[in-house]
Image (tube, helix red, strand yellow):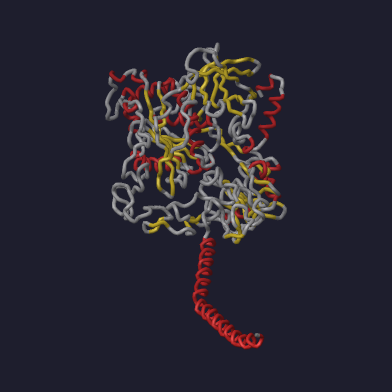
């Protein structure tokens, strides 16, 4: 390690402890074991310098810090124009796109340099601590805040030049564009009026679409999603300065409920599907030059792909990038690389020259730094000379506070009660986007014939043993947000609940090899310590070579999946492999499925699977549940009469009332809506009350008759006593 040059201070020792903790304990420093290469790291405490220079303190900031036994002063100037003012953010509710209004900071992005260090550079976000990159003496460093530090501690780490992501663009892409580059296309030869056009500022309005997997990784938090995308975009803009291009965020759509296109390891198929969806849906959302899909799925050997030379094309200005980790500089480099393809840049060949040590930025294996080569600059110049980039001259304009809103765009916006588009078939909604007279609603699972469904009506049934049902509340046409049992809750086959699904070795074997198969004994899993195609804890592509990771013995149950008693073999593709070997009298079966859709490798044990008492698999590591899934909710809190849900509230068993399951009640939780049990209980109470009232009314005449008879009898007896008392009185006289 480069840091071995220095004595290990207590700060270094503390960082070493931090880095051994699981993702949940230090998400801001290293969110996965594969997020960042720490070839050098150091804890620093930046200090804000006030009064350093005259001027607006909001537009300019200075920090001092000690790193590598030297004091540095960093000067930062706020960026402007990072996104279109009032850019729209779309999420989904019951399949309907809706404009969201998350809290977004736009005043915390800065560029700068180290005072007295020519050639240094900084791109920093101050939204929550200091996050970004530093270039010091041609070396690139990342900086991140240490989670929950009381001393404003940050970790500075060396960014590796080792390429981690590869691009799927092939030379045969966009033949029309490359034909025109040779003077053979319909645009004809280059016009002198376009020469040196890229010396003037250019603007690329980018629309980003986030898939459901990536949104889940950000804990379904819209603000976190937008802020992280903007952190990445700030770094993209730094890469693009070399070609005088500003990338401006024009809008964001989050597939908050489900993916709207099929995302697979076939990048060309995914790109084509997204491109078709974009052409139909996004033009009415916001004006943009390019749209890119950001997915949380690992896409295998290639992590990104885009159409080449298509930036101003209404039909093909799209790209796809994988973001299955938490390394923002790495994702920003991949996004900038794919945008480079949209701008007409091909992959560099060995004859290209870089301004910095190679590889250059458009190398097929995407580096985190390096700059654009002379080949890339020539390609960009040629595209502009041919007139293929005229849309980049258009400076972005602020949008209305609600984006491109109008009645008929099938998006319910402010001032609208409904919006069915401009077509027929909407019995509850007027063309003015207001509800018809007598209608309570127009759409949604809790809307039936223009009326709100009764409370306790099921609107989302359980999809798994670990999922929880939701019910209408009688006041909204929308179903409550999906809730499920807390991650780590025990489930069938000695499994654990994870993201609403029961994860067990037994269940995964049955999914892969059929219902008769069983989980193999632990002896089979020793194969995972070898670290080859037949047993490993994951793999990654380093150029054309696939490198396998050996499992530590304690992590063996979290590597390749092994099963026994296999009676049926799955269909596999030519590049996939089934594994069989004999271990202690047991035939162990496994599979290497590098193109599976649901995990980086369909033959690996899934996250959330139990790997021992109070242990769970996360990223092919066997970790303590309490460490990676901390929670304030427990069975004790629910009085052992319910289970904890993913929102850390009690979902009570039937017969007990939330939130603590202490008192008698219908069951359910505060998050699921009133269950049908509550409706049945209310009906029974109503029947009981009506029965009592009916009984009272029926008995009332008899009661009154009895009272009258008693009163009459009492009066008769009184008269008889009075008659008898009269003579006695006279005799006494």
Check the picture and name the quadrant holding the N terminus.
Answer: top right
On the image, the x and y values in percent for residue 468 come to: 55, 54
Instruction: Please indicate, yes or no, whether residue 456 appears anywhere in the rendered image.
Output: yes
Taking the spot 52% from the left edge, 78% from the top edge, the residue there is 704
List x then y, in percent, for residue 324: 53, 38
Foreground: 631 or 729?
A: 729
Q: Nearer the viewer, residue 70 or 532?
A: 70
Q: Residue 525 versus residue 252: which sits nearer the camera?
A: 252
Where residue 512 appears, as percent x and y from the top left, is 57, 53
Q: Residue at x 54, y 41 (%)?
A: 219
Eyeballing the image, is 276 above or below 461?
Answer: above
Q: At x 63% / y 22%, what residue is drawn? A: 44
Q: How many marks?
A: 0
Q: Give the quadrant of residue 727.
A: bottom right
Tell me if residue 394 comes above or below residue 465 in the rendering: above
Residue 415, given in percent of the width and then of the height, sits at 35, 43
């Amino acid at each position: 390690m480069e840091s071995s040059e220095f004595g290990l201070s207590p700060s270094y020792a503390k960082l070493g402890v931090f880095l051994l903790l699981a993702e949940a304990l230090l998400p801001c420093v290293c969110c996965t074991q594969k997020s960042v290469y720490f070839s050098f790291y150091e804890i620093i405490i930046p200090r804000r310098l006030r009064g350093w220079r005259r001027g607006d303190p909001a537009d300019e900031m200075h920090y001092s810090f000690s790193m590598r036994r030297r004091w540095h002063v960093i000067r930062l100037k706020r960026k402007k124009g990072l996104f279109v003012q009032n850019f729209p953010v779309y999420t989904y509710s019951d399949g309907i796109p809706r404009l969201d209004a998350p809290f977004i900071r736009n005043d915390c992005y800065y560029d700068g340099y180290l005072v007295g260090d020519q050639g240094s550079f900084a791109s920093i976000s101050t939204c929550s601590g200091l996050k970004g990159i530093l270039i010091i003496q041609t070396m690139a460093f990342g900086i991140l805040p240490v989670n929950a530090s009381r001393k404003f501690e940050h970790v500075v780490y060396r960014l590796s030049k080792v390429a981690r992501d590869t691009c799927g663009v092939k030379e045969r892409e966009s033949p029309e564009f490359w034909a025109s580059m040779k003077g053979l296309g319909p645009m004809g030869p280059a016009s002198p009026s376009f020469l040196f056009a890229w010396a003037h500022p250019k603007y690329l309005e980018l629309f980003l679409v986030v898939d459901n997997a990536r949104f889940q990784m950000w804990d379904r938090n819209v603000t976190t999603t937008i802020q992280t995308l903007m952190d990445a975009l700030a770094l993209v803009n730094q890469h693009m300065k070399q070609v005088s291009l500003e990338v401006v965020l024009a809008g964001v759509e989050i597939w908050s409920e489900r993916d709207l296109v099929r995302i697979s390891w076939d990048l060309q198929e995914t790109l084509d599907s997204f491109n078709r969806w974009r052409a139909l849906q996004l033009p009415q959302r916001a004006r943009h030059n390019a749209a890119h899909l950001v997915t949380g799925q690992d896409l295998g050997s290639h992590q990104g792909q885009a159409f080449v030379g298509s930036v101003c094309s209404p039909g093909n200005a799209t790209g796809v990038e994988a973001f299955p980790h938490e390394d923002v500089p790495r994702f920003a480099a991949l996004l900038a690389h794919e945008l480079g393809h949209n701008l007409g840049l091909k992959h560099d060949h060995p004859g290209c020259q870089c301004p910095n040590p190679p590889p250059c930025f458009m190398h097929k294996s995407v580096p985190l730094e390096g700059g654009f080569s002379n080949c890339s600059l020539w390609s960009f110049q040629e595209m502009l000379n041919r007139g293929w980039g005229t849309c980049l001259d258009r400076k972005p304009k602020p949008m209305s506070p609600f984006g491109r809103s109008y009645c008929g765009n099938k998006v319910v916006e402010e001032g609208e009660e409904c919006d069915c588009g401009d077509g027929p078939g909407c019995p509850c909604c007027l063309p003015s986007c207001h509800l018809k007279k007598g209608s309570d609603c127009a759409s949604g699972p809790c809307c039936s014939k223009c009326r709100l469904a009764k409370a306790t009506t099921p609107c989302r049934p359980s999809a798994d043993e670990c999922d929880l049902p939701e019910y209408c509340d009688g006041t909204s046409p929308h179903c409550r947000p999906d809730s499920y049992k807390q991650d780590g809750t025990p489930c069938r086959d000695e499994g654990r609940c994870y993201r609403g699904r029961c994860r067990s070795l037994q269940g995964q074997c049955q999914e892969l090899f059929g219902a008769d198969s069983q989980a193999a004994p632990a002896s089979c899993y020793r194969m995972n310590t070898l670290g080859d195609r037949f047993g490993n804890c994951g793999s990654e592509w380093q150029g054309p070579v696939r490198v396998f990771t050996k499992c530590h013995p304690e992590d063996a149950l979290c590597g390749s999946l092994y099963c026994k008693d296999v009676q049926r073999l799955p269909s596999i593709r030519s590049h996939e492999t089934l594994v069989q070997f004999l271990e202690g009298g047991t035939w162990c079966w496994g599979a290497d499925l590098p193109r599976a859709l649901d995990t980086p490798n369909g033959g690996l044990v899934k996250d959330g699977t139990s790997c021992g008492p109070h242990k769970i698999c996360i990223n092919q590591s066997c970790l303590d549940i309490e460490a990676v899934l901390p929670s304030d909710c427990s069975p004790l809190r629910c009085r052992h009469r319910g289970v904890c849900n993913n929102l850390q509230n009690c979902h009570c068993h039937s017969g007990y009332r939330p939130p603590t399951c202490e008192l008698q009640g219908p069951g359910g939780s505060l998050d699921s809506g009133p269950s049908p049990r509550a409706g049945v209980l209310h009906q029974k109470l109503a029947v009981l009350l009506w029965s009592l009232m009916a009984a009272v009314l029926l008995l009332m005449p008899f009661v009154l008759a009895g009272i009258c008879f008693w009163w009459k009898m009492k009066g008769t007896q009184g008269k008889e006593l009075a008659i008898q008392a009269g003579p006695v009185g006279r005799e006494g006289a």
